[in-house]
Image (tube, rainbow, N blue to C red):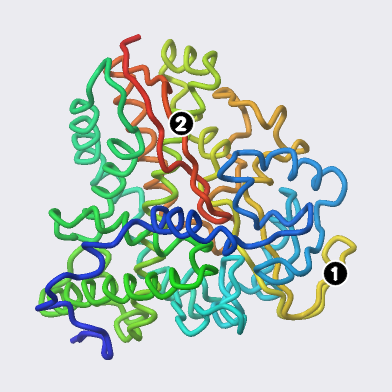
Amino acid sequence: MATKPADTPDVQGAAAPVYRTSPTAVEALDAHLKDHPEDLPVHTQEWDVSRSDIYVEDRWQPIFAEMRSKDPINKVTGSPYGDYWNVTSHKAIQHVEALPEIFSSSWKNGGITILDRHDDTVEDQRFELPMFIAMDRPEHTGQRRTVAPAFTPAEMTRLADDLRARTGEVLDSLPYGETFDWVEKVSIELTTQMLAILFDFPWKDRHLLSFWSDWAGDTEVALIPGLDEMRHTILMEMAAYFTQLWQERANAGEAPDLISRMIHSEAMNAMSPQEYMGNLVLLIVGGNDTTRNTMSGIVHAMDAFPDQRALFESDPSVIPNAVQECIRYQTPLAHMRRTATEDTDLFGHQVKAGEKLVLWYLSANRDETVFDNPDTLDFTRENARRHLAFGYGIHRCVGARLAELQLRILLEEMHARRMRVKVVGKVERVRANFVHGFRKLEVQLEKF
């Protein structure tokens, strides 16, 4: 029988766990930079798009357009994240993703984000979190197969009615004629509910899932002295919480929740504490940040393109394709990273073994050679499904069907209520180069 992973802290008896009293990652970063602006990483190169200011200020589009036009594969040296290759075109990203033996995802080679886990200048380098998305074959294959049954078409059918009822409850709780934050009231609430169901997580504590997701997915925090240590403490307490759940489920029979699937799987029941936590981080960030930010992106995009909102309101048959177009337009994860395992030629560029390549999904999804008028939202776009927001190849997002289902049901339930969402106040974006989304979106509701 599977047992509790060893060497993991216990939270029982803790008087005031850090995760119950700490600020969110965004709040901590904002507060730190207000007092210590000199700690903001310095970027000196025009095409060093690891800089977070271009995303929080939403001015990344022309920079990537210039790269795609002049040099879609180019090298940046001396960034706060070290040297890396920008890979910005749809074709080049698909090519790299299709060759996982040459372009590794493994955490042993640096992992899947621009943050280099093996950089001696990064304090976080001692804190490795192996996860199956950051593994190469064959380890990746067995662990992915363990969780994949949770996202089959049959499982989506099983979840759909409950998901629709919960979405309706959230929408029916919203006020009309009053300003509120869509991110907090809708996007975070719906995604944390879904994660709690997938993990069979204690319902009263479900908002911890979005709290942990923010701390785990913020690459900027790892570069700031002091905040990295706070991040480590918070994630270790996350590990302790989930370890207690593991111990409880290990003594029970098989069940469809993700923790039980891990426990009763030959590929995952002997995971180290770090690997267990890494896979939890993957599933939490993957299930929270991506869907959550597209739920916010849908509202913001329809407000920016009223002709498409009018089309949605008059013709609900566009909803399935509208989901794909909104995922393309928003692209909730800006990048994934790969590391070359050998010297190789990449469309005329000589990439050396050990060099990292950053695959900018949000650039590929605006590639003019694939998508006509890519900076425009178009619910009738014939090739919207060609977006790379879920990745490509063996690492394509295992939960893509669930994300699509959540977004489709949200739009269907909004339409059924004749709900029009208008952006009327603050629009604040995430300061990050990995997660691409919104931290605040003030809106009002009206009927159409």
Picture residue at 20% right of the left edge, 86% below the top: 3
Q: Position of residue 124 (x, y in %)?
A: 49, 78
The disc label shown at residue 295, or none: none
Q: Relative to 384, does residue 266 appear above or below in the rendering?
A: below
The disc label shown at residue 298, or none: 2
Q: CA distance from mark 2 to mark 1?
A: 39 Å
Most extreme residue toward the bottom is 7
Q: Relative to 167, does residue 376 appear above or below in the rendering?
A: above
Picture residue at 81% right of the left edge, 42% below the top: 66
Picture residue at 57% right of the left edge, 36% below the top: 329
Image quadrant assignment for residue 198: bottom left
Picture residue at 49% right of the left edge, 64% below the top: 221
Q: Residue type at mark 2: give it.
A: Ile
- Tell me: 239 left or right of 336: left
Q: Secondary structure at mark 1?
A: strand
Observer-nearest residue: 18 or 320? 18
Total labels drawn: 2
Q: Cβ–Cβ below 8 Å for labels 2 and 1?
A: no
Q: Residue type at mark 1: give it.
A: Asp
Q: Position of residue 28 (x, y in %)?
A: 40, 58
Badge 2: few (under 14), some or many (20 or more) residues near its Cα, within 10 Å? many
Q: Position of residue 216 (x, y in %)?
A: 41, 64
Residue indicated by mark 1: 345
Image quadrant assignment for residue 190: top left
